[in-house]
Amino acid sequence: MTLSRVLIAEDDVDIQKVIRMSLKMRGVQEIVVTENGEDCLAQLRNFQPDVILLDVMMPKLNGYETCKRLKANPATSGIPVIFLTAKAQHFEVKEGLDAGALGYLIKPFDPMTLHDQIAALLQKK
Amino acid sequence: MVTLIEIFDSLASGVIAVDLENRVAFLNRAMCRRLGVKAEDWVGRHAAELLGLIAPRLISAEEKFVMRLGWQQDPEAKLSHQLEWKTDDGIVHLREDSGPLRSSEGKLIGRVFVYHDISREKDIDRMKSEFISVASHELRTPMTSIKGSVDLILSGFAGEITSDAQELLEIAQKSCDRLIRLINDILDLSKIEAGQIKLNLARMDLTDIVQRSVRGVRQIADQAEVNLRVHRPSDLPQVEVDKDRIEQVVTNLLSNAIKFSPAQAEVRVDLTAADGWVQCAVVDAGCGISEKDVPKVFGKFQQVGEKRKGGTGLGLAITQALIQEHHGKIWIESKVNVGTSFIFRLPAATG
């Protein structure tokens, strides 16, 4: 499975670049990067991604809340959400999955296998 | 002359004693204060009435644990429960410890309940959790950028690099991966020591866990030219364990054994059972550990012997803590130039 459209919500500029390059390397054509949950939700009015990658700790609207709002809205509830976050504790993973995410990937991630990890989660769905 | 009543009335913890018919025999001053009652009004009355005063102050799910009126079915049991007690100023965390009450001749005459205020301990636990969570997040975030950038350059994505640059970046990559393992190990150990890991216990055969670990380390054993062998009896009792955590233990012991073995040597896992235990010994024919170094082995950041062999220095501390969490025991037997056995025991599942 190859991804073609990915929406990222990540407030750390350096990590944005690493995610972007790691996906670009594997042929992802359209990558839109937003810096917080609010911008991520706003972006969905004119961009339909295959998957949304969400950080947790972001200004304005955190990842858990963003995911809950996405899942509560019939227009966006069908878009798979995967957390990509440094929040690695058992209860934090649970909170992300309870918010409706398809998967939970922990930072630091391997940029060489990020695409395949996302694809594997989407295929399981 | 100091009386026992004066001593009990001076305790900060609340005390209630009941007789064999569950009638209140004694209430100390701290307990009266907590309940807003006078001891003389309550001595002789049935404990169920007292429970009627206590229950509304607790969150409902806890009611069934408090002052179990059916304690006579198992009068010797020593029980301990944590409770959240509502007050006008907020919530107080209490621990109820109870046990048999005996006469001076040792005859069972009732039960005694003691209520300790553990709010401060709860606060410290919460602060520890917050620290672990924040430290984990703050360390992982910059590591993500470093690891991501180095891995991407080494993949050739950013263009060709010279062989010297490649060598230097590989050093950075190796150290970066080691730092990530160290962060994970420190956080893992902090969580275990703070009693914050949740074991997902299930009954299983320890052999299955050992086989999974053996598969996991097969590649490093092949690279080190070390043979792996598992011995097990045909009728090994099951154990009740968290399979991921025990696999972590066995994998750690096997990786160490491989690391310290010479080429062509054998690393053996011996599974046995006796006296209500299931035992697992990971035996190597490596250089062994001197008697003076043996006590250091399970310490943090201790690596015995002359040469560092990689690793975070926390693996065996985590291993020991995990075995203790499972109510097991772990120890080592070693002879210099002969080899080392790391042996752990877990209680066999009963019933």
Image (cartoon, grey):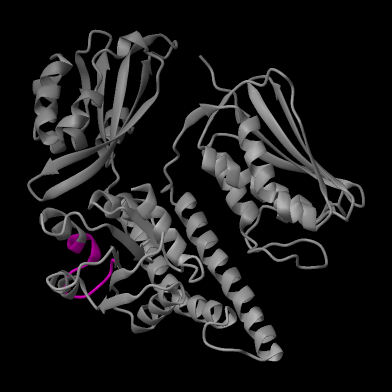
Counting from the top left corner in percent of width and height, residue A65 is at: 18, 61
Left or right, B259 with respect to A83, comes to right
Of residues B98 and B270, the one nearer the viewer is B270
Left or right, B143 with respect to B321, comes to left
Left or right, B259 with respect to A26, comes to right
Counting from the top left corner in percent of width and height, residue B142 is at: 44, 78
Q: Residue at x 55, y 22 (%)?
A: B349
Is residue A63 rendered magenta in the image? yes
Q: Is residue A109 above or below residue B335?
A: below
Q: Main secondary structure of the magenta part?
A: loop
Of residues A6 and B251, the one nearer the viewer is A6
Using the rendered image of the protein, determine whether residue B334 is visible from the camera's viewpoint: no
Q: Residue at x 69, y 48 (%)?
A: B253
Counting from the top left corner in percent of width and height, residue B5 is at: 27, 29
Q: Residue at x 55, y 83 (%)?
A: B153
What residue span does the magenta drawing correspond to?
A: A56-66
Is residue B305 rendered magenta in the image? no
- Which of the 4 quarters of the picture holds residue B199? top left
Of residues B51 and B45, the one nearer the viewer is B51
- Which of the 4 quarters of the picture holds residue B348? top right
Using the rendered image of the protein, determine whether residue B306 is visible from the camera's viewpoint: yes
Counting from the top left corner in percent of width and height, residue A58 is at: 25, 73
- Which of the 4 quarters of the picture holds residue B45? top left
Q: Can you say which quadrant of the picture contains the N terminus of chain A?
A: bottom left
